[in-house]
Image (cartoon, rainbow, N blue to C red):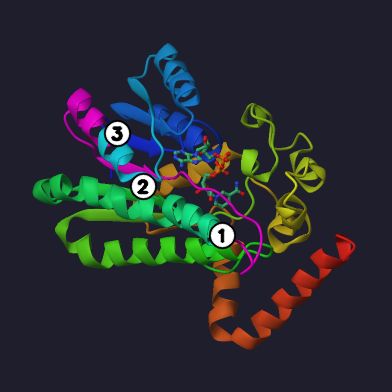
C-alpha cells in the first residue's frame, strides 16, 4: 500500500516501537497519525511532536484492554479524518512466569495482547470491507513464532496474536484487506529496560550492552533477554523496527521480521521439533544458571 495520504492509527503509540512507528508513518507521508496509548499524556506528547514537524496528528488516551476505548479511538479518528486506512494494534505487555501466574494476570495479558486485536479488527473491518481496502498491522513477536523463555503468558498470547493475524489475512485478503504481523526479537524499549528517551540514542551507542545489563524490573525477564537467543542476536532500536514496518507495508508483506534470522529459527522449529525443544531447554538452563538457580 502506498502510505502517502493514508490515515494511520497506532495503539501503544506513546512509547517504544509504537512511537517509532508513528514517526516513521508520518515521515513516509501519512495523511494523519492517530496516537493512542493508555498513557494519554505520552500519546499527546508524541502527537504534538509530529505536529511540530508539520504533520497532522492526534493523541488519545486508550486502554486497549477495554473494547469501548478502541471503539472511541476509531470513532474519533473517523470524525477527524473521515476514515482509517491502516490500524496498527501494537500495544502489548509482558508478564513473567509460568502456569503459576494468577488467572487475573493471564486475563490481563490476554486482553491486551490478543483480545485487543480482535476488538480493533471488529471496529475497523466493516468500513474497510465496504471500501474494499484497508490494512491491519498487528504487533506480535518472534515469541509468537518460537517461544519466550521465562514467560508462558507472553509466548502463548503472542502465538495467538500470530494465529489471528493469519486468520484475518486468509479470510479477508481477497476482499482487499491487507494484514501484516510484526514479529521482532529484542528491541530496546521500556519493555526491555530502556530509559524512556532511548530511541533518541544511536544503535551503536552501547545499546546492546545496555540491554544485557540494563535494570531489572524485578521479574527477571530483562536478564532473560540478555542470555537468551534474542539477546545473542542483538537488540534493535525501535526506529529500525519501524523502518521494517514501512518497507513491509510498501510490499504488502504479511510477516515482518526485523531480525531476519527468526525465519531460519522457525524453519528449524517446524522441521525438527524435538531438536528445537532440546536446544531451547539448553537456553533455558543457561538462563537459570546465570540467575544462580
Ligand atoms: N521490546 C521488545 O523487545 C519487543 C519484541 C517483540 C515484540 N514486542 C511487542 O511490541 C509491542 C510494543 O512493545 P514495546 O517494546 O514498544 O513496549 P513499551 O513498553 O516500550 O511500549 C508499549 C506502549 O504501549 C502502551 N500500553 C501498555 N498497555 C497498554 C494498554 N492496555 N492500552 C494502550 N496502551 C498500552 C504503553 O504505555 C507504552 O507506551 C508490544 O506488543 C510488544 O509485545 C516488543
Q: Which residue is mark 2?
A: 249
In terms of secondary structure, where does tag 2 sit? helix
Q: Position of residue 99 (x, y in %)?
A: 61, 69
The reply, left or right, for residue 256 in relation to residue 260 is: left
Q: Which residue is mark 3?
A: 73
Distance from Cα at disc 1 to Cα at disc 2? 26 Å
Q: Earlier in the sequence, mark 2 or mark 3?
A: 3
Distance from Cα at disc 3 to Cα at disc 1? 25 Å
Quadrant of the rendering where the C terminus is positioned: bottom right
Q: Is residue 25 magenta?
A: no
Mark 1 C-beta to ligand 1 under 8 Å: yes
In terms of secondary structure, where does tag 1 sit? helix
Distance from Cα at disc 2 to Cα at disc 3? 22 Å
Q: Residues in magenta?
A: 74-102
Give the residue at x 54% y 55%.
105
Give the residue at x 51% y 56%.
104
Query: Could one spot residue 189 in this view of the protein?
Result: no
Q: Earlier in the sequence, mark 3 or mark 1?
A: 3
Amino acid at each position: 500500500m502506498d502510505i502517502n495520504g493514508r490515515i494511520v492509527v497506532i495503539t501503544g503509540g506513546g512509547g517504544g516501537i509504537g512511537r517509532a512507528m508513528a514517526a516513521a508513518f508520518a515521515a513516509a507521508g501519512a495523511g494523519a497519525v492517530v496516537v493512542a496509548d493508555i498513557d494519554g499524556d505520552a500519546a499527546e506528547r508524541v502527537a504534538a511532536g509530529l505536529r511540530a514537524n508539520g504533520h497532522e496528528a492526534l493523541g488519545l488516551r486508550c486502554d486497549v484492554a477495554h473494547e469501548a476505548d478502541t471503539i472511541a479511538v476509531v470513532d474519533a479518528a473517523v470524525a477527524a479524518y473521515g476514515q482509517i486506512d491502516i490500524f496498527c494494534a501494537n500495544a502489548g505487555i509482558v508478564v513473567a512466569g509460568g502456569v503459576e501466574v494468577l488467572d487475573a494476570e493471564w486475563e490481563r495479558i490476554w486482553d491486551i495482547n490478543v483480545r485487543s486485536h480482535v476488538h480493533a479488527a471488529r471496529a475497523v473491518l466493516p468500513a474497510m470491507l465496504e471500501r474494499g481496502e484497508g490494512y491491519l498491522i498487528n504487533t506480535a513477536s518472534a515469541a509468537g513464532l518460537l517461544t519466550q523463555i521465562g514467560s508462558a503468558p507472553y509466548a502463548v498470547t503472542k502465538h495467538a496474536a500470530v494465529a489471528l493475524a493469519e486468520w484475518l489475512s486468509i479470510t479477508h485478503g481477497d476482499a482487499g484487506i491487507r494484514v501484516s504481523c510484526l514479529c521482532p526479537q529484542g528491541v530496546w524499549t521500556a519493555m526491555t529496560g530502556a530509559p524512556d528517551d532511548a530511541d533518541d540514542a544511536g544503535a551503536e551507542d552501547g545499546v546492546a550492552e545496555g540491554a544485557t545489563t540494563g535494570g531489572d524490573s524485578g521479574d527477571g525477564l530483562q536478564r532473560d533477554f540478555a542470555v537468551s537467543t534474542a539477546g545473542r542476536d542483538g537488540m534493535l532500536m525501535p526506529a529500525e523496527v519501524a523502518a521494517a514496518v514501512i518497507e513491509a507495508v510498501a510490499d504488502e508483506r504479511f510477516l515482518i521480521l526485523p531480525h531476519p534470522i527468526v525465519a531460519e529459527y522457525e524453519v528449524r522449529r517446524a522441521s525438527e521439533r524435538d531438536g528445537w525443544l532440546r536446544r531451547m531447554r539448553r537456553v533455558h538452563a543457561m538462563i537459570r544458571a546465570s540467575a544462580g538457580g
